[in-house]
Amino acid sequence: MLEREQESLVIPSRLNKGAQLTPRTESLLKIDGEQGALCFDQAQRWLGLLSPAAHRIKDAGILSTERTRKVLRPWIDQGLVQYKVFYVRQRGWLWLTSKGLKYFDIPLRYYEPTPATLSHLYAVNTIRYMIAVRRPADTWRSERFLRAEQHTPLQESKPAHLPDAELIRTNDTVIAIECEMTVKSEKRLEEIVFDLAANKRYNAVWYFLPPQGKSAITTAIHKLPLEHQQRFMLYNLKGEVYTQ
């Protein structure tokens, strides 16, 4: 009888199996929710950067595919993260479900990427990661957060242009981050550049763009007064400053 009672008190060894938070995982999934989605290889790099033992990772700066799957699988299985491959022989994408956004207390609407949005989203994610490596003390605020906070006064016909992100420096200066992957019409570029220049919130505007987009952006910036032109910096997608 005593033996049976003791057996009933034994706690199953697999009771705690499932999704369990670590600071690294929590940070990654919050970044995922803020950005809208992360490509699998970008999740690998964030996990490498956020690792408490980054110096022990075999490939510096990036967690292995196997270990990344092991970290993410419980969250996918519990319906907090969605995973989907959009293109054959390409990495899949990860984003938080409505349940996941609520779980991590991220006050944003559910977002599901589409093939048309992947190129720009990948580039913006890369820029965020690159800045996090170079400026870890600065704070990134994604467009999704900016849009959620945007309030348009009744007298305005349209809201101010929202950049792809804001970077808040440790000295409280605010930088608008723009990533231009395609060449827009001259009129549209001027509207965006003039709107950003008129926004007194921004101490500077950093544009990240491929070489084919530099000329059009430069032309639009040169139509601004000199004091506003000086607030703009142009970078390639590797974060290198374009020379004039």
Image (cartoon, rainbow, N blue to C red):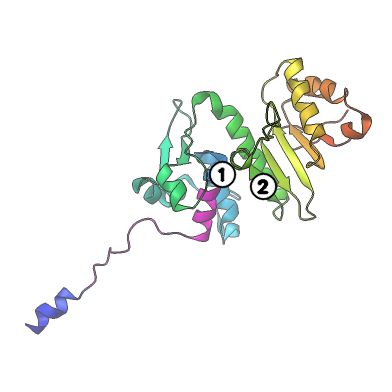
Judge the density around disc 1: few (<14), some (14-19), many (≥20) Cα neighbours within 10 Å: many
Q: Quadrant for residue 125, please give it.
A: top right
Label 2 vs 1, first from the N-terminus: 1
Magenta part of the chain: 11-31
Q: Residue at x 58, y 28 (%)?
A: 119
Give me the disc on residue 140: 2
Residue 14 relative to residue 151: left or right: left
Residue 116 rendering spot, x and y as whole percentages = 53, 23
**Looking at this rendering, what residue extends furthest in the right direction?**
226
In the image, what residue type sits under mark 1? Glu
Residue 123 rendering spot, x and y as whole percentages = 63, 33
Give me the disc on residue 34: 1
Give me the disc on residue 82: none
Q: Quadrant for residue 155, please give it.
A: top right
Q: CA distance from mark 2 to mark 1?
A: 10 Å
Quarter of the image with the C terminus in it: top right
- Report whether residue 65 is seen: yes
Quarter of the image with the N terminus in it: bottom left
Q: Nearer the viewer, residue 234 or 147?
A: 147
In the image, what residue type sits under mark 2? Trp
Badge 1 element: helix
